[in-house]
Amino acid sequence: MNFTGSILLVDDEAHIRKFISLLLRHLGTTRIFEAANGAEALVVYKRETPDLVMLDVNMPVMDGLETLRALKAINPDCVVVMLTSLANRQTIDEAVALGAANYIRKDAPPEDIGRALAETIEACFEPEQEGDAPA
């Protein structure tokens, strides 16, 4: 897979941003923007209009769900993947209800994170091949 779109990576932990950036570069992404919290993310999103946003749930200043709401208010079609190390059913359900494309645990093995990202990118950005459309 070679995703050439741009990605905004939002996480308050610099080492997590670096780790996820490495996985994204492995998938072929070279345009990666970063933000340390939701408020920064909104500024970067408006300036750069990335194709995909990877958004941590638990952050200071503005948490992931609040940021997701604000991103969807700016662009209802924005593609957002939620990231977290603590998952509870209510948060997952709320993120999906707000329009998150996927929900990935940051503490999953790197190959699982990479696979989930690749599947989400394919589902959200890859054009349907001729013959793939339902009859």
Image: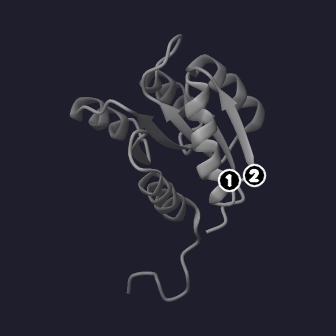
* Residue occupied by mark 2: 30
In which quadrant will I find the N terminus? bottom right
Q: Residue at x 35, y 41 (%)?
A: 96
Q: For this view, does 64 lie left or right of residue 40?
A: left
Q: Residue at x 47, y 62 (%)?
A: 119
Q: Is residue 99 above or below residue 67?
A: below
Q: Residue at x 39, y 82 (%)?
A: 134
The numbered dot on residue 25 is: 1
Q: Residue at x 40, y 44 (%)?
A: 104
Q: For this view, does 125 lie left or right of residue 131?
A: right
Residue 127, given in percent of the width and then of the height, sits at 58, 71
Q: Earlier in the sequence, mark 1 or mark 2?
A: 1
Residue 40, given in percent of the width and then of the height, sits at 66, 20
Amino acid type of the residue that numbered disc 1 sits on in the rendered structure: Arg
Frontmost residue, 124 versus 114: 114
Q: Is residue 63 above or below residue 127?
A: above
Q: How is the image coloured?
A: one colour
User: How many residues crowd around disc 1 within 10 Å: few (fewer than 14), some, or many (20 or more)?
Assistant: some
Frontmost residue, 67 versus 112: 112
Secondary element under disc 2, as helix, strand or loop, is loop
Q: Are marks 1 and 2 in contact (CB under 8 Å)?
A: yes
Frontmost residue, 83 versus 132: 83
In the rendered image, which quarter is residue 98 located in?
A: top left
Residue 44, given in percent of the width and then of the height, sits at 71, 28
User: How many residues crowd around disc 2 within 10 Å: few (fewer than 14), some, or many (20 or more)?
Assistant: some
Q: Is residue 130 above or below residue 114?
A: below
Q: For this view, does 91 lie left or right of residue 22?
A: left
Secondary element under disc 1, as helix, strand or loop, is helix
Amino acid type of the residue that numbered disc 2 sits on in the rendered structure: Thr
